[in-house]
Amino acid sequence: MTVSGNGAMGYIGKRRSPLRAVTQITSVTTGVTINAEEGVINCFTQTILTSATTVFTLTNSHIKVGCAVLLSVVDVVGDALVGTNGLPVVMTQVIADGSCKVVIFNADAASLVGVIVLGFKVIR
């Protein structure tokens, strides 16, 4: 078994497809569509207040009921220093055939300001 990195999330074994990316266009709640087992989501510039959340829909043909969608924060562009500009925590909710909800929570006393870059992987 080989554990490698790909710039967004680590992966185990051989990559089956090139890494794909999608960008939110109009707001932090705008849903995104990317039909890949793994990839990158560039979120719209946002401000998330202390203990607040933002939610958007990830549409992806690889997502099925009963699978896991792993998410990680790859970067916060505009974040001078973690701890002074919020602390993003990301999770999924409502996994259905073809989509899930992505929840970004600010777990810090400071507001989170910037572009959040997320990595994802669908595990079936």
Image (cartoon, rainbow, N blue to C red):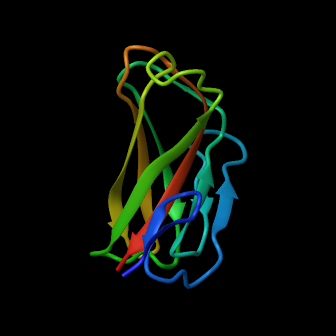
Q: Is residue 103 above or below residue 62?
A: above
99 sits to left or right of 116: left
**Front residue (pair 50, 6):** 6
Front-lying residue, 112 or 7: 7
Q: Position of residue 34 (x, y in %)?
A: 61, 68
User: x and y percent of residue 77 in the render?
Assistant: 64, 34
Q: Nearer the viewer, residue 6 or 63?
A: 6
Q: Residue furthest right?
A: 25
At 38% from the left and 65% from the top, the residue drawn is: 69
- Residue farthest along the front direction in this orientation: 2
* Along the viewing direction, whichever of 110 and 34 lies nearer the viewer: 110
Total label count? 0
Q: Which quarter shows the C terminus? A: bottom left
Side of 3 where 15 appears, left or right: right
Q: Is residue 43 left or right of residue 95?
A: right
From the image, which quarter does the N terminus lie in?
bottom left
Position of residue 47 in the picture relative to residue 64 (left or right): right
Residue 45 percent location from the top left of the image: 66, 33
At x 60%, y 54%, the residue is: 41
Residue 71 screen position, x and y as percent: 42, 55
In this rendering, the answer to whether 41 lies above or below 14 is above
* Residue 62 position (above or below residue 83): below
Q: Residue at x 31, y 75 (%)?
A: 65
